[in-house]
Amino acid sequence: MLFRSVNEAYRTGPGHLPLAEVLDWSAEDRDRVLRGSAARRATLDMWRRNAIVCIANVWRRDESSVTTAMTSRMDRIRADETESPIVREAARRALRAIGSGP
């Protein structure tokens, strides 16, 4: 479980994507989910970066909402040299913002 609780306004529904799932998307997942949408213009790296930023923003509103599993996942992204630099930098900044990183 990556999130302890989710504000009702942020629950998954039409037009919403679970942030933790976006972090784990492959290029094929992105294409499948966004087929027929103008949102396909954003690259996979952009989607993953934005998911990290959103997770950090959720944490700022409610510190109890982001679990240790999620911060550990972001730390692995930050440290993974095979990750895109923009995704790694977003993870580094998010971890620093929530007080869990360098």
Image (spheres, rainbow, N blue to C red):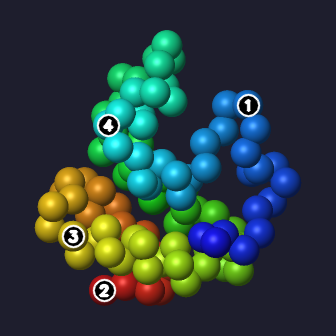
Give the amino acid at mark 2.
Pro
Q: Quadrant where the N terminus lies?
A: bottom right
Q: Which mark is residue 14?
A: 1
Residue 22 x %, y %: 48, 48
Residue type at numbered disc 3: Asp
Quarter of the figure with residue 79: bottom left
**Real-space CA distance between mark 3 and mark 2, rounded to the nearest whole angstrom:** 15 Å
Lower sequence index among marks 2 and 1:
1
Question: Along the polypeptide, which appears first: circle 2 or circle 4?
Answer: 4
Is residue 89 at all visible to an observer of this figure? no
Residue named by callout 3: 80
Of callouts 1 and 3, which one flags the residue occurring earlier in the amino acid sequence?
A: 1
Q: Which mark is residue 27?
A: 4
Marks 1 and 4, the one that precedes in the sequence: 1
The residues tagged by marks 4 and 3 sit, at their Cα atoms, a distance apart of: 18 Å
Residue 75: x, y in percent?
Answer: 36, 77
In primary-sequence order, the first of circles 4 and 3 is 4
Tell me if mark 4 has few (under 14), some (14-19) or many (20+) residues whose alpha carbon lies within 10 angstroms of its own.
few
- Residue visible at 46% across and 27% down in the picture: 32
